[in-house]
Image (cartoon, rainbow, N blue to C red):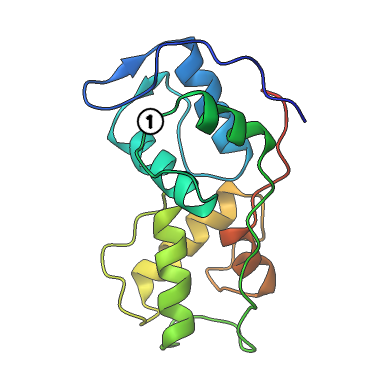
Amino acid sequence: MSAPPFQPPLMKYPPITRGPGVQRWQQQMRARGWNIAPDGEYGPISRRVCQNFQREHYLDPDGVVGPITWRAAWEAPGTVPPPAPPDVLQVGSYGEAVRTWEKQVDSRGWTIRNIDGAYDEETADVCRSMQSALGLPVTGRVDYRTWDAAWRERAAIPA
């Protein structure tokens, strides 16, 4: 899929960049599965999503949406997740699989204050929010589909 033409200015923060191009990029990132509100204001949350998207796609993580990052938002393939753990993650689970999932979900915009490898009520609440936003069954448990969704972006679509 081809990206629409990039229209300057560069999107960066600080200061906040505003405009229809910002909103179009935010809509595309949301369509790809990122937790971002398409409000037309490129502030700290947009910058964080941009940097994490750039890292996942091996771009310079400068947090600036210019022609390369803009194009990647439409044309880059989805991110492939690591293998899911054999057991469903739920309240009471702990270990490296929980920590890995917490880090990934946090990087995608669902903030987890305490990334510690312990699946607690905060982790379950974040899981439910992500599941709801991505159209998954809202269980608060990380099964294969929820694990996969934390990494795998939806196919790029036109904005």
Q: Is residue 114 above or below residue 21?
A: below
Q: Residue at x 53, y 30 (%)?
A: 68
Q: Is residue 44 left or right of residue 67?
A: left
Q: Residue at x 60, y 29 (%)?
A: 71
Return the residue nearer the eye: 23 or 14: 14
Q: Is residue 44 left or right of residue 109?
A: left
Q: Which residue is mark 1?
A: 64
Return the residue nearer the eye: 23 or 140: 23
Q: Residue at x 74, y 26 (%)?
A: 2
Most extreme residue toward the left is 15
Callout 1: 10 Å neighbours few (<14), some, many (20+)? many
Q: Is residue 99 left or right of residue 153?
A: left
Numbered-mark total: 1
**Residue 13: x %, y % from top left:** 27, 27
**Residue 51: x %, y % from top left:** 39, 44
Query: The N terminus lies in which quarter of the figure?
Result: top right
Return the residue nearer the eye: 78 or 94: 78
Q: Quadrant of residue 43?
A: top left
**Residue 72: x %, y % from top left:** 60, 36
**Residue 39: x %, y % from top left:** 42, 22
Q: Is residue 107 above or below residue 27?
A: below
- The amino acid at mark 1 is Val
Q: Residue at x 38, y 22 (%)?
A: 11
